Amino acid sequence: MGRPYSDDLRERVVKAVIKGGLSRHQAAAQFGVGISTAINWVRRFRETGSVKPDQVGGYRPKKIAGPYRDWLVQRCRKADFTVRGLVSELAERGLKVDYRTMWEFLHAEKLSYKKRR
């Protein structure tokens, strides 16, 4: 996903439409942005009074936390495990997670089980 356009460009396009009397199509052509982009910026300005973009991304709390985390760390240090096995064990305890979530947790906690010959 690309970065949002600068606020300065957004303000110039909206100003050209609202105060300058240009159509959205003309303003888009003049400033080199897409027509739908100019339309959306003008709509956003009329609805909110601002041309600032919405937040991109953000913080998402970890799914495996608290008592589940504590149990899982103890479980991994106590005996051999597989990622899929841990997923099913957590499901039995009431927390449903997928393979990728479990793998990321194990990687972040630096927990692994290496088979030896």
Image (tube, rainbow, N blue to C red):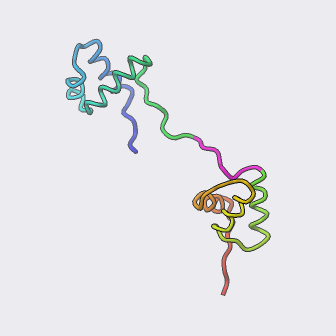
Identify whether 16 is placed above or below 112.
Answer: above
The residue drawn where x is 24% and y is 32% is: 32
Q: Residue 104, position in %: x, y?
A: 61, 59
In-front residue for pair 43/49: 43
In-front residue for pair 116/90: 90
**Quadrant showing the C terminus:** bottom right
The residue drawn where x is 65% and y is 49% is: 62
In-front residue for pair 88/11: 88
Q: Quadrant of residue 1?
A: top left
Q: Quadrant of residue 42?
A: top left
Left/right of residue 93 with respect to residue 4 in the rendered view: right
Q: Residue 64, position in %: x, y?
A: 69, 53
Left/right of residue 43 with respect to residue 29 in the rendered view: right
Q: Residue 93, position in %: x, y?
A: 75, 57
Instruction: Please tell me whether the stretch drawn in magenta is mainly helix, strand or loop.
Output: loop
Q: Which residues are the magenta region?
A: 59-66
The residue drawn where x is 27% and y is 17% is: 17
